[in-house]
């Protein structure tokens, strides 16, 4: 049976159809989840996609974290359900306390929209099961506040617990320790700033994102 992936929409989300299309290209079923709903239905996995939820007012994700759907996402994650936050979705997950750290403005204070090369640091996450440690993936970024930061204690924990999922080969935004993506302690919630849903077809310049989203489907 095909995996059903719920894709959350907030006012200001703009990558939901990219996520839906990529999931369906990989053999899954995409289902849109409205921010005001407090029930995810019978989805097998959740993507919190990119965009500018609630206009990024206050700071990215600060308002979206209070949406009813995020309570449902938190319960789903607590029960072991696979959850991925992409770009603005990563920001929402950190604001909601589902992932550690925070995303701040890029070094240089410029919006970045460009291909990046990512290195897979662990296969022990829902997003990297189809990869090998050391694999390099070409996946684009599209953000102004993608500079990942956390305190020294948390950084040590992320390293020691093998929770850095992806690193930039050539750090574009100043993220601490070149971090592009992290996971939670249970390894079923992952956030990353690059957009794998925009790299699932060679016509887009890379199909490497299929490795990541395909892993999500496998994990569900």
Image: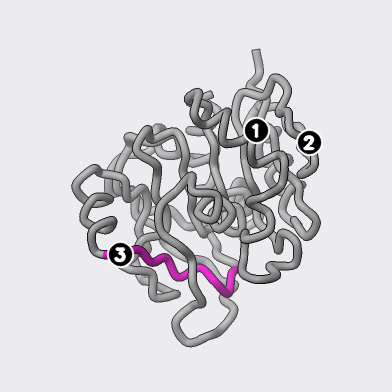
What residue is pinned by disc 2?
37
Of the numbered discs 1 and 2, the one sitting upstream in the chain is: 2
Say which quarter of the image contains residue 84: top right
How packed is label 2: few (under 14 Cα within 10 Å), some, or many (20 or more)? some
Q: Helix, strand, or loop for circle 3?
A: loop
Q: Residue at x 48, y 40 (%)?
A: 211
Please say if the residues under marks 1 and 2 sit with CB atoms less than 8 Å apart: yes
Q: Quadrant of the N terminus?
A: top right
Q: CA distance from mark 1 to mark 3?
A: 28 Å
Please tell me which residue lies in front, 8 or 78.
78
Q: Is residue 178 left or right of residue 79?
A: left
Q: Earlier in the sequence, mark 1 or mark 3?
A: 1
To which residue does mark 1 refer? 72
- Residue 198 lies, in percent from the top left, at 63, 53
Between the residue at mark 1 and the residue at mark 2, the CA separation in whole angstroms equals: 8 Å
Residue identified by numbered label 3: 151
Can residue 108 be seen here? The reply is yes
Spot occupied by residue 28 in the image (x, y as percentages of width and height): 66, 27
- Give the residues in magenta: 143-151
- At a point 59% along the width and 54% down the height, the residue shown is 92
């Amino acid at each position: 049976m095909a995996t059903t992936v719920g894709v959350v929409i907030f006012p200001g989300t703009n990558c939901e159809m990219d996520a839906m299309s990529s999931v369906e290209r990989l053999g899954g079923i995409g289902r849109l989840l409205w921010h005001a709903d407090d029930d995810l239905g019978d989805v097998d996995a959740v993507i919190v996609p990119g965009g500018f939820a609630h206009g990024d007012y206050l700071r990215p994700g600060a308002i979206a974290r209070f949406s009813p759907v995020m309570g449902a996402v938190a319960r789903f994650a607590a029960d072991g359900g696979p959850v991925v936050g992409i770009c603005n979705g990563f920001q929402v997950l950190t604001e909601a306390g589902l992932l550690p750290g925070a995303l701040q403005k890029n070094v240089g204070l410029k919006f970045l929209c460009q291909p990046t090369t990512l290195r897979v640091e662990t296969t022990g996450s829902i997003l990297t099961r189809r990869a090998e440690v050391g694999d390099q993936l070409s996946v684009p970024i599209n953000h102004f506040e993608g500079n990942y930061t956390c305190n020294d204690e948390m950084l040590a924990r992320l390293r020691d617990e093998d929770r850095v999922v992806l690193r930039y080969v050539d750090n574009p935004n100043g993220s601490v320790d070149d971090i592009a993506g992290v996971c939670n302690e249970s390894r079923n919630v992952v956030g990353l700033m690059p957009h794998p849903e925009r790299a699932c077809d060679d016509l887009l310049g890379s199909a490497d994102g299929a490795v990541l989203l395909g892993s999500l489907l496998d994990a569900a």
